[in-house]
Image (spheres, grey):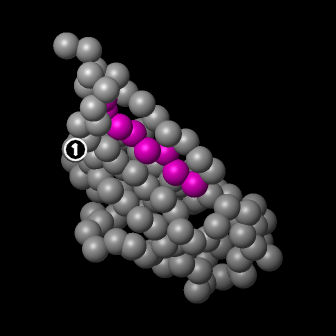
Amino acid sequence: MNTVGRFIMSSTSVAAAILFSGTVLAAGSITILTPKDGAVLNSGSGNKLEYNVQLSPNGNHLHVYIDNGDPIIVRSVSGCPCSLDLPDLGPGKHDIVIKEATSSHAMTGVEGHVTVNVK
C-alpha cells in the first residue's frame, strides 16, 4: 500500500490531502477570510477573525495563535464561515495562525496564516 501526503500552500492556508493510488481519500483545509494578509487594523478591541474550515479525518478542533502566544482553543467548527473576536492588539505587526489539532492536541499540519499591521 502506497500512501502519499500532499500539501497545498498559499499565503492564507495550508490544506492537506491523503492520496491513495491518485484518489483523494480525505482532506482538510483552513482559509482565513478576514483579515486579509497585510491588512491594517485598528488597535484595541473590535477586530474579528473570520475563516472557513473543513477538518481532516484526524482533526478535532482548532488552535488560534497570535504572535506565538498561548493558543485560543476553538472546539465548535460547524456552520462555517466561522468567526472569533480577536483579543486587543497593540500597534505593530502581528501574526495570526489557525492550526488544526487532533483530540490529543497534536497538530495535523492543516493551517491558515495571515500577518496584519495594527495602527
Q: Which quadrant holds the C terminus?
A: bottom right
Report the number of numbered marks: 1
Comparing 21 with 100, the one in front is 21
Q: In this view, does 22 lie to the left or right of 89?
A: left
Residue 77 magenta:
no
Residue at position x 49%, y 72% from top? 50
Q: State which region is magenta.
A: 12-19
The residue most toward the top is 1
Q: Is the magenta stretch mostly helix, strand or loop?
A: strand
Q: Which amino acid does label 1 sit on?
A: Pro
Crowdedness of circle 1 by 10 Å Cα count: few (<14), some, many (20+)?
A: few
- Examine the rendering and report whether any part of residue 103 can be seen: yes
- Examine the rendering and report whether any part of residue 102 can be seen: no
Residue at position x 63%, y 50% from top? 11
Q: Is residue 42 left or right of residue 107?
A: right
Q: Position of residue 115 (x, y in %)?
A: 68, 58
- Answer above or below: position of 6 versus 4: below
Q: Which quadrant holds the N terminus?
A: top left
- Mark 1 = which residue? 57
Q: Position of residue 70 (x, y in %)?
A: 48, 55
- Answer above or below: position of 100 versus 45: above
Q: Position of residue 72 (x, y in %)?
A: 42, 62
Residue at disc 1, secondary structure: loop
